[in-house]
């Protein structure tokens, strides 16, 4: 079989519709001791309008850096490749234009809402700010803020606008941050582990809310998480990252039913399940590689049971395989139908 | 299972800045002078030679001579040992007292902690210079009494800082872990808490040497420390103060030596701090 | 046989303003010899406070804590020493839970040293190496410091350290919460192996119900400092009686899109 060039395996676009976001060969590097290390190493993917994509990976996989690069938040790192969102190349925008994209075309929420909120200002003030800096009048901005909090099912929203962040519970704070991200009517929401710090029941509420809002608004979501349960419950598509690259990309149903990459398979087998008893977990041996010490060839080969000589020498390219994209020389067998 | 190989690669490469090089050179010079100065110095600097007194700087005497006709440069170099050794002795002595007080306060019952900290507060509120002056006067004016006076007045700040750091360290999970495994109070403090709290003291120890050199010389200058024939810098300035207008070099030379020493150790302290604390290193 | 008994334990903490907050309210339960008991609850449920009371790191305001005949809060001398030998702890944070200035070997053998179980240094070192092998660490790394080990490896050191004195009861406070998924499974498996190898009674504290279902035979559900429900694994996961337990279980995400979809439709219909 002939080797395909890099972006060959992107999902087939719906005819007549350009994807909202398309990322091509994104590399994010950091300088360490006069050499440059790729934290994100050639990532290509696209997100359609209204699609919810989960980006899954362990520590050091580069999932958060990828997300932050989409917003150009990593000032100390250098990003190359192209990130086209709503027709504009993010990496080519001026800082002023980029400021309008943040909170405008793309909204973002983070894991720790408390560090994101200013403890000395009321939350109404902070939610309205996104609009105020775009020249919306105070009254309109506050009316909109109230509206958003209602949409996020915050009770007694009008009173809450005058409250300060410390008066809110973790789940409420995450809603406030979500309101700040949504008030500019973004097309894409990037959510970086937004529920990791929350208790399960609150997490469930926030996820249900996100689900509802993304459906009603036709909002595309890029959801970064390490929790495969959240992926299964929330996303339409899942991308698995390992050591700086996407190793598998497919719709959730096929991927969870029959993952093609040994790493994805290993991850799914390694999680204990709430819905059934188990004797022993299958585990992946070893640990995820550190950013500065990624193996040659396929980065997963030292931990892989299916690895053979080629995996040690040649890094597999993400290629199309039965409707999914997989970066593996020896993928897991297709699901028996 | 293999070790995480990343750690080896993350070891920061030591980059020597211009300032770092200057400070290191100065400290090296001072240490060299303190170690070998008295051995290398000509014997003449201990004798008076009235005929060649108060000569301005010349090829024979680079920094001139004092009222007794002794070479000022050599006396300053020889004085490095007295001054620096005294300062190091003082700082080490009160640091040890501070460590002891802090350890007892941090490990003992709450009332003892409170009591020791109130004593420390009293110590902190007294102007240390005045107290040292009183102590030195009571013990009789000499270098030894200046050293003793400063050793017993300098500890409160060290004790307070270290005690607070130790309280923080004691909140660390590994201290609870040591408790659970059943270590004794003594071992808990000496193996687990103290080693993880001393970083701050290394910096303070270094910076304090600079300040102590100044106070020690001040005490000598006002007459309660080392007495004039001594090569201690403060005593030298005190002995020469009558000649400021006629023979400026006799006062200026030990004065500059003092300034250089205190600044060099202060900067060394900053450098050690930056080196131990990665967050400061990042912000450079 | 009951190994550990907590009877009407209450604990309050002084609050910055106003009345002290009740963290534990009349908590009573037993731990039977040989069982693995799971304590689950959300943040603020008091599960970590229970662990601290069990380990004599906190003194309960009232109630009794008894381990094998030892009155834990008042234990002293020889009794305390036996308690410290027989009850050990593995806790969450693999970065803060090991003294960074001690080597792996020193950390693992510390219990042997402080309890005088092995006064000979060379023999202690051999035992530490043996334990390292047992928990899946390379014994050649005995002189390394914690910062040269990964999170999962540190948790293995913590387990070896806890096992060195051959304890009877192991308290695990969120031991895998901070680990990556692939490493988490390794540590869970190791805990299972060690439980069998050392014949341990385990109290496993976690917020992750899936992990608890996997490891524990009996489960206690806590909410705001009180026991809501306790029962066997089958009872709690198969047929939870209390609404709180039900809501907790229903909120745990299942890594299966088909089941997740089914559950979501069920919720919408309800």
Image (tube, grey):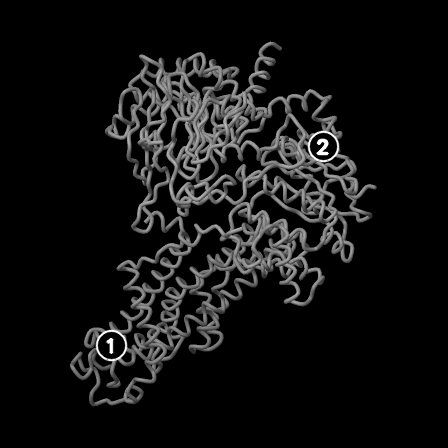
**Res A223 → quadrant:** top left
- Residue at the far left: name it: B59
Tag 2 subunit: C
The local secondary structure at tag 1 comes to helix
Q: Chain of mark 1?
A: B
Q: Is residue B156 left or right of residue C164?
A: left
| Percent of width and height locating residue B91 | 45, 67
At horizontal 47% and vertical 26% (from top left) the residue drawn is A164
Residue A18 image point, x, y percent: 31, 17
The front one of A186 and B60 is A186
Q: Quick one: label 2, few (<14), some, or many (20+) residues within 10 Å?
A: many
Relative horizontal placement of residue B202, taking residue A29 as reference (left or right): right
Residue A123 appears anywhere in the view: no
Check residue B267 in the rendering and tell me which mark sits there, or answer none.
none
Residue B250: assigned label: 1
Front position among marks 2 and 1: 2
Question: Looking at the image, which residue is at 45% across and 14% down?
Answer: A215
The reply to whether residue C261 is in sight is yes
Distance Cα–Cα, label 2 vs label 1: 84 Å
Residue pushed farthest front?
A1
Query: In the rendered view, would you say C7 is above or below B154?
Result: above
Residue C239 against residue C173 in the figure, above or below: above
Residue lying at the far top in this picture: please name it: C269
On the same chain, marks 2 and 1? The answer is no
* Residue ID at (41%, 70%): B87
Does dot 2 land on a helix, a strand or a loop?
Answer: strand
- Asked whether, in this view, residue B223 is left or right of residue A152, the answer is left
Other residues around mark 1 within 10 Å, as few (<14) / some (14–19) / many (≥20) = many
Residue C233 placement (x, y as % from top left): 72, 30
Circles 2 and 1, Cβ within 8 Å, touching? The answer is no
Circle 2 residue: C219
């Amino acid at each position: 079989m002939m080797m395909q060039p890099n972006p060959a395996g992107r999902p087939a676009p719906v005819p007549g519709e350009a994807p909202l976001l398309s990322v091509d060969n994104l590399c994010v590097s950091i300088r360490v001791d006069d050499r440059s290390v790729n934290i994100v190493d050639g990532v290509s993917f696209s997100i359609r309008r209204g699609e919810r994509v989960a980006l899954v990976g362990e520590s050091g996989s580069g999932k958060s850096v990828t997300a932050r690069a989409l917003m150009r938040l990593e000032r100390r790192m250098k990003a190359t490749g192209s990130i086209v969102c709503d027709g504009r190349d993010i990496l080519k925008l001026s800082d002023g234009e980029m400021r309008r994209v943040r909170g405008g075309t793309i909204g973002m929420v983070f894991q720790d809402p408390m560090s994101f909120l200013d403890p000395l200002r009321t939350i109404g003030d902070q939610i309205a700010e996104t609009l105020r800096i775009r020249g919306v009048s105070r009254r309109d901005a506050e009316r909109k803020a109230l509206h958003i909090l209602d949409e996020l099912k915050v009770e007694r929203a009008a009173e809450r606008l005058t409250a300060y962040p410390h008066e809110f519970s973790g789940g409420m704070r995450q809603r406030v941050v979500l309101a700040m991200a949504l008030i500019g009517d973004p097309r894409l929401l990037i959510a970086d582990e937004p529920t990791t710090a929350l208790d399960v029941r609150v997490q469930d509420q926030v996820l249900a809310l996100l689900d509802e809002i993304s459906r009603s608004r036709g909002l595309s979501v890029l959801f970064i998480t390490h929790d495969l349960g959240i992926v299964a419950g929330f996303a339409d598509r899942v991308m698995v990252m390992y050591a700086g690259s996407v190793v598998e990309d497919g719709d959730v149903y096929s991927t969870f039913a029959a993952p093609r990459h040994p790493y994805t398979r290993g991850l799914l087998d390694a999680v204990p399940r709430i819905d059934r008893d188990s004797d022993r977990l299958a585990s992946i041996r070893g640990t995820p590689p550190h950013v500065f010490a990624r193996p040659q060839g396929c980065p997963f080969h030292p931990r892989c049971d299916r690895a053979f000589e080629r995996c040690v020498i040649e890094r597999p390219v993400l290629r199309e395989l039965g409707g999914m994209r997989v970066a593996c020389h020896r993928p897991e067998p297709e699901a028996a139908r | 299972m293999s070790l995480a190989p990343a750690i080896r690669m993350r070891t920061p490469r030591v980059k020597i800045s211009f300032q770092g090089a200057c400070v290191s050179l100065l400290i090296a010079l001072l240490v060299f002078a303190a170690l070998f100065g008295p051995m290398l110095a000509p014997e003449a600097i201990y004798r008076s030679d009235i005929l060649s007194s108060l000569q301005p700087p010349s090829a024979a005497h680079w920094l001139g001579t004092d009222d007794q006709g002794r070479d000022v440069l050599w006396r300053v170099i020889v004085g490095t040992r007295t001054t620096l050794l005294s300062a190091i002795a003082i700082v080490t002595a009160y640091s040890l007292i501070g460590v002891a007080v802090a350890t007892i306060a941090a490990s003992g019952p709450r009332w003892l902690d409170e009591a020791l900290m109130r004593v420390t507060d009293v110590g902190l509120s007294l102007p240390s210079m005045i107290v040292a002056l009183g102590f030195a006067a009571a013990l009789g004016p000499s270098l030894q009494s200046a050293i003793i006076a400063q050793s017993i007045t300098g500890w409160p700040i060290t004790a307070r800082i270290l005690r607070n750091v130790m309280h923080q360290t004691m909140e660390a999970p590994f201290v609870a872990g040591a408790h659970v495994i059943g270590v004794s109070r003594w071992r808990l403090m000496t193996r687990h808490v103290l080693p993880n709290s001393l970083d701050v003291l290394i910096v303070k120890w270094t910076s304090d040497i600079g300040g102590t050199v100044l106070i020690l010389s001040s005490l000598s200058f006002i007459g309660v420390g080392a007495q004039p024939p001594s090569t201690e810098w403060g005593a030298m300035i005190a002995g020469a103060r009558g000649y400021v207008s006629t023979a400026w070099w006799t006062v200026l030379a030990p004065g500059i030596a003092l300034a250089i020493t205190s600044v060099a150790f202060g900067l060394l302290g900053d450098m050690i701090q930056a080196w131990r604390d990665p967050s400061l290193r990042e912000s450079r | 046989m009951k190994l550990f008994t907590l009877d009407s334990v209450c604990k309050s903490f002084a609050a910055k303003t106003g009345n002290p907050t009740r963290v534990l309210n009349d908590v009573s339960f037993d731990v039977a010899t040989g069982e693995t008991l799971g304590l689950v609850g959300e943040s603020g449920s008091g599960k970590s406070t229970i662990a601290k009371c069990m380990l004599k790191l906190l003194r309960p305001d009232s109630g009794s804590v008894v381990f094998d005949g030892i009155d834990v809060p008042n234990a002293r001398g020889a009794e305390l020493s036996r308690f410290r030998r027989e009850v050990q702890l593995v806790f969450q944070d693999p970065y803060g839970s090991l003294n960074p200035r001690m080597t792996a070997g020193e950390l693992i053998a510390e219990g042997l040293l402080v309890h005088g179980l092995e006064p000979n240094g060379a023999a202690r070192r051999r035992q530490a190496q043996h334990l390292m092998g047992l928990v899946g660490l390379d014994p050649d790394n005995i002189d390394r410091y914690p910062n040269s080990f990964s999170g999962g490896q540190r948790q293995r050191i913590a387990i070896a350290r806890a096992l060195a004195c051959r304890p009877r009861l192991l308290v695990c406070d969120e031991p895998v919460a901070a680990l990556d998924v692939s490493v988490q499974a390794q540590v869970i498996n190791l805990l299972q192996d060690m439980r069998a190898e050392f014949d341990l009674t385990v109290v496993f504290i976690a917020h992750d119900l899936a992990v608890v279902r996997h490891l524990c035979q009996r489960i206690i559900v806590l909410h705001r400092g009180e026991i809501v429900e306790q029962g066997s694994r089958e009872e709690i996961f198969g047929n939870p009686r209390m609404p709180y337990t039900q809501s907790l279980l229903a909120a745990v995400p299942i890594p299966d899109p088909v089941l997740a979809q089914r559950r979501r439709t069920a919720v919408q219909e309800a």
